[in-house]
Amino acid sequence: MARAEPGGAPRDRRGIRWLDRRAALWIGFLAVHGLLIWLNLAAPGYPLGDVTGVYKFWATEATDGWMRIGIDAPWVYPILAFAPMTAALALGPELYGLTWLLLASGLNAVVFGILLGRGRLARTRRIAAWWWLVFLAALGPIALGRIDAITVPFAITGMLWALGRPRVAAVLFTIGAWIKVWPGALLLALAIVAPRRREVLGVAIGLSAGIVGVSLLAGSGLDVFGFIGEQTGRGLQVEAGLAVPFLWAIVGGSSDHSIYYDRQILTFQVNGPGTEFAAALATPLMLVGVAAVSVLGVLAVRRGGSAGRILVPLSLGLVTALMLGNKVGSPQFVTWLAAPIVLGLLLRPRRLALPASVAVGIAVLTHLLYPYLYGWLLIADPAFVLLLTLKIVGLLVLYAWSIVELVRAGRRRLAGPPAGRPAESRPLTLEE
């Protein structure tokens, strides 16, 4: 039998209790981000390739006066993506990669502080914080080494403030969407559940108009919307869900299908009979998935479901719809899952146990696929095609969970939470 401490706690629980402390969480944060920075800089597979090989080129080309990408020419990203890419030149081109990693880690630190709050460290906050750290570590270097790493802090903060400060959340989601489009899904979810959705939409439209206006004054013309056209011309990337059947065809010995490198888009894509049709089908399929989740969200709101009960599955369903129907399917897309799941763990950790566990599993599978052993997927090795298949199955599980939860949320109003549990519709604020 464990000896009790003077305060009554058994000795063998001291380590567990220490993990509940704020200091332990911050030590964990530093350890995980230190590991991710080291992996990006030193691990095999060139994990920081897009940052130092592409972002740096775009940034230096603009600062040297050659071409302002997105202004002087169409670009694959929305215009605000150029801001962090340029900011990473702060310590000089030689330290571009390290500066980028410090910038992404610094943004995560701000969000981590908001998540922990300034008052008593509630159990649900500890759960959400530790889960995020485990998720980042499981995902590996890609968690910091792409432009998505800049948008995730905006997305998580917006989710944390969505129920209590919807207009501020709308600002954060809109800024994130003008860096990379996906936070627009969270903005859509907020507009569906917010009682004052006109204000939310007004903030988003007004801010977007300002961003476009400044771009036009800078001489962008229609290039400010170039990211829309740049995406439509892409083929079917090797990591996309719709590419899986063609990869299995290659595994089965098909000589009609192959994997090739597109030098214009700078990605590996699949080629052969049916791939062009699948690529053309991707966007409509994604829109159908988004529409289905959105309709269920609207119905749940109209039937009296609480915003706190609806927002998490609605956001997760929209995000997974974007991932499943996307013809790109890049590994960094997995970072998107953190925003709705962190809020879900903060509100209702038990109900989020399944999606939180599945998301970590998806992160592990993604880490196994990229970057160290990525070459095995590019030759359609059966084991790595199986890993990709399991990852897509995991995303389907998350999408299905979202659908089920939205249907349940629309059946009846939730009763008040048990004593000691945070109310779902209670505003989450920085002061808590």
Image: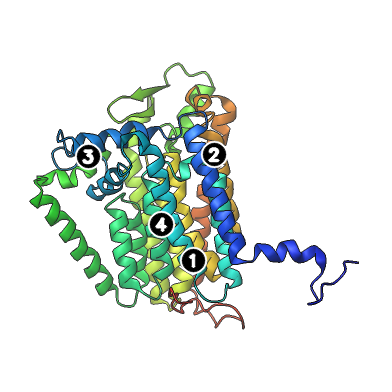
State which quarter of the image contains the N terminus: bottom right
Residue 383: give x, y in percent of width and height.
60, 29
Label ID, residue 115? 1
The residue at the point 53 percent across, 68 percent down is: 346
Mark 4 or 3: in front is: 4
Assess whether mark 1 and mark 4 are in contact (beta carbons under 8 angstroms). Answer: no
Q: Residue at x 52, y 37 (%)?
A: 39
Q: Is residue 63 above or below residue 6?
A: above
Residue under numbered circle 4: 153
* Other-residue count near label 1 (Cα within 10 Å), few / some / many at <14 / 14–19 / ≥20: many
Relative to 342, 266 lies left or right: left
Q: CA distance from mark 1 to mark 3?
A: 34 Å
Q: Is residue 351 visible?
A: no
Q: Earlier in the sequence, mark 2 or mark 4?
A: 4
For the residues labelled 1 and 3, say whether their Cβ atoms are less than 8 Å apart.
no
In this view, the mark in front (2 or 4)? 4
| Earlier residue among tags 2 and 1 | 1
Give me the residue at 56% from left, 30% from top: 384
Mark-to-mark CA distance, 3 and 2: 28 Å
Sequence order check, earlier mark of 4 and 3: 3
Dot 2 corresponds to which residue?
367
- Depth check, mark 2 against mark 1: the one in front is 1
In the image, 413 versus 353, the foreground residue is 353
- Crowding at dot 3, Cα within 10 Å, few <14 / some 14-19 / many 20+, comes out as many
Q: Is residue 21 above or below residue 252?
A: below
Identify the mark nearer the N-term, 4 or 1: 1
Q: Is residue 57 above or below residue 271?
A: below
Assess disc 2: are there few (<14), some (14-19) or many (≥20) residues with their C-alpha within 10 Å of its C-alpha. Answer: many
